[in-house]
Image (spheres, rainbow, N blue to C red):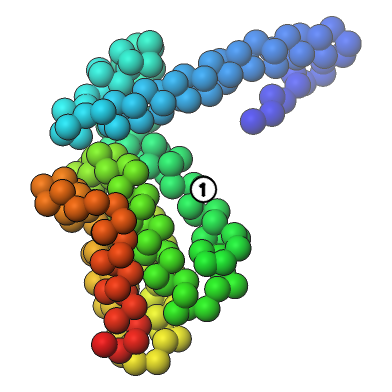
Amino acid sequence: MSVRPEPGSGAEGGSADAGTRAGERRPRKDAVRNRAALLAAADDLFARCEKPEDVTMSDVAAAAGVGKGTLFRAFGDRAALIRALYAARLEPLREAVAEGPPPLGPATPARERVPALLDAALCFKLDHRHLALALEGADSPYEAEHYEGWHALLSGMLATVDGIADSDFTAHALLATVRADLVEHLAGARGLGREELRARLGEFVGRLLDGG
């Protein structure tokens, strides 16, 4: 945000304005650094925790080396912190889907892109299991912005596939296969390995797209 010069300021006013600008840059830089430190601390805590609900705002602030008030000023509450961290981790995948090359990018035919998108979503959930669980615990996964985007994307592609009668419902059903709680159950409680989960999901999606 730019700072407006004082009305009627001359050379001296310009110097004062420059000083004001310089003075106002520092808090913004501090805020950026604090935000990055808080996100990194939260990321580390969620990666190492056994129960996402055990990670508190006090834990995050202490790990980042800032006061709890700084954390609340940066994010507002725990749910907002989790959403911000999830969005930051998801951004590379968003970019790959929006403008990347095949098989995730928009130029890929639906029959190839749908399995690739779901495989990427599964890998993301496996790589960020506890963070994804924390997000689903903080908000309804069906009301999250990222869910709406993925559903719209899948539904639109499925509508072009012969044999898919209800692309809207089918998109919901496919996204249910990569919910964080299911991924945690299969990878955690059931002990299924990463490649086995990817293979099973790929086979399931392939059968659905082939009408089987």
Indicate the secondary structure of the residue bearing disc 1: helix
Q: Residue furthest left?
A: 189
Residue 73 in percent (x, y) is at 39, 23
| Residue 172 figure quarter | bottom left
Residue 55 in percent (x, y) is at 21, 27
If the image is split into quadrants, where does the N terminus sit? top right
Residue 140 visible within the image: no
Q: In this view, does 149 lie to the left or right of 61?
A: right
Residue 210 in percent (x, y) is at 34, 87
- Residue visible at 87% across and 13% down in the picture: 10
Amino acid, disc 1: Pro
- Residue visible at 38% across and 16% down in the picture: 64
Q: In this view, does 119 lie to the left or right of 189?
A: right
If the image is split into quadrants, where does the C terminus sit? bottom left
- Residue visible at 49% across and 47% down in the picture: 91
Q: Is residue 170 above or below residue 145?
A: below
| Residue 170 figure quarter | bottom left
Residue 208 versus residue 133: which sits nearer the camera?
208
Residue 7 visible within the image: yes
Q: Which residue lies furthest to the right in this view?
A: 11
Residue 112 versus residue 173: which sits nearer the camera?
112
The residue that disc 1 covers is 92
- Residue visible at 26% across and 59% down in the picture: 197
